[in-house]
Amino acid sequence: MADHKLLTILAFFLSCSLFAQQKDAGLWTSVNFKGEFSKKLQWSIAPEVRLRDNMTNVGSVFSDLGLDVDLPKKFSLTLTYRFGQRNEIDFFETRQRLQLGLGYKISYNDWTINLATRYQGNLQGVGNDRDADFVTTWRNKIAVKYEGFDKWELVTSYEFFHAYDDGVALKWNDWRWTASAERKINKRNFYSVGYLIQRDLVSNEPNTDFVVLVSYKHVFKKKKKDSESVDTLEK
């Protein structure tokens, strides 16, 4: 009898939880092209397609154009412009954003910790869905990478988003966790698979996304300068 009551209580709380929030499964696929203008200045182009609604509909299509500058003492500076289209059911809405970020890297043997803080400014299109990747916000991220395997790199990261909302400055609006594994094909080609969970904290019906990540990367390198692969962190 006690077990039956316990199961009833658990079922009740589970049903309340499911009613109070929305959940969705997605698939994000991207192709990344990377190269360098000099040893301290790199460029990148990364088109991406994202599926939503349990991977049945195209949610958004966009491309990132980025510049990375290596600074002294393991700091780095990034500038990224994103242009894309968001599926609003009846039409596709054009969206644009600009990011400026500062990063810091800590390395020890096969381990690397990357810390990044980025200001993200919306340039066009916001929509009613509060898309965390396009709204104006401040993003902070910590990523840990392990390179102890022959051809594999393992990365996990946690990121949180702050924004000015409802009269509150730096309100915690969203968080995102990722885990991925990158496989080296040769000196210039890589592919990776991963998993992402993100949560919207401020909507009336908080949305949680569970996303499969699939990516291919090609690194352009000047002749006689082939070296280690370019570090990769999530979007």
Image (cartoon, rainbow, N blue to C red):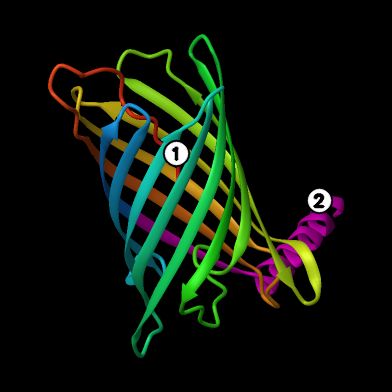
- Residue pictured at 81% horizontal, 51% vertical: 3
Sooner in the amino-acid sequence: mark 2 or mark 1: 2
Three-letter amino acid code at the position of disc 2: Asp
The foreground one among 19 and 87 is: 87
Q: Which mark is residue 233?
A: 1
Mark 2, residues whose alpha carbon is within 10 Å: few (<14), some, or many (≥20)? few
The percent position of residue 68, horizontal first and vertical second, equals 40, 40
Residue tagged by mark 2?
3
Query: Can residue 27 be found in the magenta stretch?
Result: yes
Residues in magenta? 1-28
Q: CA distance from mark 2 to mark 1?
A: 47 Å
Three-letter amino acid code at the position of disc 1: Leu
Mark 1, residues whose alpha carbon is within 10 Å: few (<14), some, or many (≥20)? some
- Tag in front: 2 or 1: 1
Q: Residue furthest right?
A: 2
Q: Write down the quadrant of residue 175 in the picture.
A: bottom right
By secondary structure, the bulk of the magenta-drawn segment is best described as helix
Please tell me whether mark 2 sits on a helix, a strand or a loop. Answer: helix
Residue 90 is left or right of residue 222, and the answer is right
Residue 42 is left or right of residue 10, and the answer is left
- Residue pictured at 41% horizontal, 60% vertical: 26
